[in-house]
Image (spheres, helix red, strand yellow):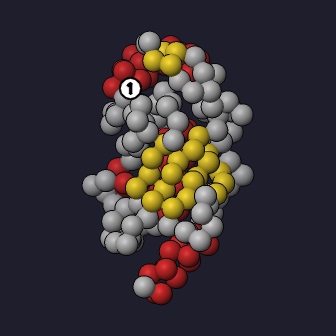
């Protein structure tokens, strides 16, 4: 158990968070459950502030962390319940991967949303068929507007 905890602690210490990301620990005594905030400074999601809860279980690094977006956002790879479609959180997870790989993957989803592997099929279809319309929908949803009858949370900084 001590080795296991040390592994997680070193994993957290090795995180290279840029200026657009920060970690917070709701319970400072529990390093296995934390929140990552991503604030993209480029791309369609620039100006937003997005929160992800991470839960690391006893089987880490053999199992990937559980990651969930806490806000309802308009994104092809994040559904309305906050589930995240990132291959390394599912079938491509390997024990050699670390939290840094997951965080970089999440950051990349905001720079390059992936319409070919969607959880939100409507957003993916918009991205594929009408990129300008998709960008307008992103801006509207980030400002707390509604898209296709769905009301989104304001996530603008």
Please determine whether, in this image, residue 5 is positioned above or below residue 94: below
From the image, which quarter does the N terminus lie in? Answer: bottom left
Q: Where is residue 88 in the image (x, y as percent from the top left)?
A: 37, 55
Q: Where is residue 84 in the image (x, y as percent from the top left)?
A: 41, 43
Q: Position of residue 53 (x, y in %)?
A: 51, 51
Please determine whether, in this image, residue 157 is positioned above or below residue 128: below
From the image, which quarter does the C terminus lie in? Answer: top right
Please determine whether, in this image, residue 100 is positioned above or below residue 139: below
Q: Residue at x 43, y 39 (%)?
A: 82
Please determine whether, in this image, residue 116 is positioned above or below residue 101: above
Q: Which residue is drawn at 37% across and 62% down?
A: 64
Task: Name, please, the residue furthest toward the left.
Answer: 91
The one nearer the camera, 16 or 34, is: 34
Residue under circle 1? 124
The one nearer the camera, 129 or 55, is: 55
Q: Quadrant of residue 23?
A: bottom right
Q: In which quarter of the image is residue 126?
A: top left
Residue 130 appears anywhere in the view: no
Q: Where is residue 25 in the image (x, y as percent from the top left)?
A: 61, 61
**Label 1 residue SS:** helix
Count of picture labels: 1
């Amino acid at each position: 158990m001590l080795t296991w905890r040390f592994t997680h602690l070193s994993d957290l210490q090795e995180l290279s968070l840029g200026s657009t990301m920060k970690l917070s620990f709701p319970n400072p005594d529990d390093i296995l459950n934390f929140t990552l905030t991503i604030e993209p400074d480029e791309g369609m999601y620039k100006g937003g502030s997005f929160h992800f809860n991470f839960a690391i279980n006893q089987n880490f690094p053999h199992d990937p962390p559980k990651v969930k977006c806490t806000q309802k956002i308009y994104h092809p790879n994040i559904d309305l319940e906050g589930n995240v479609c990132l291959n390394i959180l599912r079938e491509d997870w390997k024990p050699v991967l670390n939290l840094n790989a997951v965080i970089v993957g999440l950051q990349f989803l905001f720079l390059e949303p992936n319409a070919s592997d969607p959880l939100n099929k409507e957003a993916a279809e918009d991205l594929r068929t009408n990129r300008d319309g998709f960008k307008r929908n992103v801006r509207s949803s980030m400002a707390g507007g509604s898209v296709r009858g769905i009301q989104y949370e304001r996530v603008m900084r």
